[in-house]
């Protein structure tokens, strides 16, 4: 009987020790997770601050564009892809920028700027003078186009004010717009590569891509290829230092040989300078394991004053957010 009691006590003690061990391991694991989460938050905070700084430097680059125009270093009043703003800037690799007091081995900080007016402004396409552009976007069927015009000119319901799109992504959730419409199919460019909500109805012919230019009524694929071939310069690549630009419709026709309906379409729907730009700053920490982005859309003054006003949009998040 005594041996039985001793065995029972031993088993009980062993069970208690096992439970305590499990609890200890659980507390230790939870503490480790909290430590890792706190470390991530610190690293992410650092990356976000660097991404914000990169975005601010992108704004400075756009101010520099206006200063260089004033100094006649750039053609005044033109926006084209061989200008400095169009080149991605690596803040750690560029000798003009440096960071002290932090171990950034294996990390990266950069900003890139995109001309918003290289796309169609969906909010302007409902206007009478730009209806032909809207009709020519194949990814939108006729019923969707009617709903868009009603929303942008009258409001969807009676007594409801007109409602413009605040972001391009809103268009994806309009009734009748499918994933294929948004992302594109084999022979149809997606709306995500055609549409913006900033700028105006006209498209900058110095920065627009093939799909946008080919969607303009009256523009055939051959004319678009001639335009891009001339614009891309001797190396044949877009957004490089040897890119050429167009100053006006008359000189464009003379330099490329384009005429007739295509030249009329350019005169009707295109421009040569832009005011709205999207700046995306990106930074990493821990060798790229932690990444933060900051995206701003700004409108430059068209009268040439050297300031950026206003900030139309500001978004922050981790990569992919």
Image: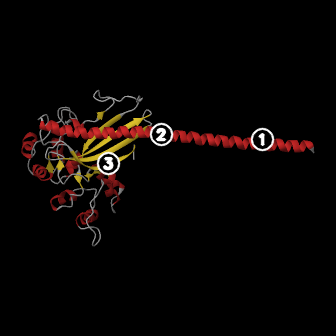
Identify the element where label 3 is drawn.
Answer: strand
Position above or below: 143 against 68: below
Could you tell me which residue is drawn at 20 percent across and 48 percent down?
A: 213
Crowding at mark 2 (Cα within 10 Å: few <14, some 14-19, many 20+): some
* Label 2 – label 3 distance at C-alpha: 23 Å
Residue 298: x, y in percent?
25, 47
Residue 88 location, quadrant? top left
From this viewpoint, which residue is outermost toward the front? 101
Image coloring type: secondary structure
Residue 138: x, y in percent?
25, 56
Q: Nearer the viewer, residue 65 or 214?
A: 65
Q: Earlier in the sequence, mark 3 or mark 1?
A: 1
**Residue that carries the numbered disc 3 in the rendered image:** 314
From this viewpoint, which residue is outermost toward the right? 1
Which mark identifies residue 40? 2
Residue 128: x, y in percent?
16, 62
Identify the element where label 1 is drawn.
Answer: helix
Q: Nearer the viewer, residue 19 or 83?
A: 19
**Residue that carries the numbered disc 1 in the rendered image:** 14
Which mark identifies residue 280? none
Q: Nearer the viewer, residue 34 or 244?
A: 34
Please give left or right for residue 103 compared with residue 231 in the image: right
Could you tell me which residue is drawn at 29 percent across and 53 percent down?
A: 191
* Label 3 – label 1 distance at C-alpha: 59 Å
* Label 2 – label 1 distance at C-alpha: 39 Å
Does the rendering let one see residue 238? no
């Amino acid at each position: 009987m005594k041996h039985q009691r001793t065995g029972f006590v031993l088993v009980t003690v062993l069970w208690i020790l096992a439970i305590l061990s499990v609890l200890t391991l659980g507390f230790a694991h939870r503490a480790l997770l909290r430590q890792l989460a706190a470390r991530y938050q610190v690293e992410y905070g650092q990356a976000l601050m660097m991404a914000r700084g990169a975005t601010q430097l992108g704004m400075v680059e756009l101010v520099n564009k206006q200063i260089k125009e004033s100094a006649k270093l750039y053609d005044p009043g033109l926006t084209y892809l061989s200008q400095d703003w169009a080149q991605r800037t690596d803040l750690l690799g560029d000798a003009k920028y440096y960071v002290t007091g932090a171990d950034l081995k294996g990390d990266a900080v950069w900003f890139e700027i995109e001309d918003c007016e290289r796309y169609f402004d969906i909010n302007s396409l409902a206007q009478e003078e730009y209806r032909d552009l809207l009709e020519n976007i194949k990814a939108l069927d006729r019923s969707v186009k009617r709903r868009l015009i009603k929303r942008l000119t009258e409001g969807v319901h009676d007594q409801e004010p007109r409602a413009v799109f605040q972001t391009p992504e809103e268009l994806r959730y309009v009734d009748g717009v499918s994933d294929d419409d948004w992302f594109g199919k084999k022979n149809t460019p997606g709306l995500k590569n055609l549409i913006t909500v900033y700028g105006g109805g006209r498209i900058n012919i110095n920065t627009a891509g093939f799909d946008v230019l080919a969607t303009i009524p009256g523009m055939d694929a051959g004319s678009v290829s001639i335009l891009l071939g001339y614009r891309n310069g001797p190396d044949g690549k877009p957004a490089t230092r040897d890119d050429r630009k167009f100053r006006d419709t008359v000189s464009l026709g003379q330099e490329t040989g384009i005429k007739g309906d295509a030249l009329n379409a350019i005169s009707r729907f295109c421009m040569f300078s832009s005011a709205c730009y999207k700046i995306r700053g990106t930074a990493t920490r821990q060798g790229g394991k932690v990444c933060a982005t900051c995206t701003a859309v700004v409108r430059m003054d068209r009268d040439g004053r050297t300031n950026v006003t206003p900030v139309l949009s500001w978004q922050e998040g981790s990569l992919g957010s």
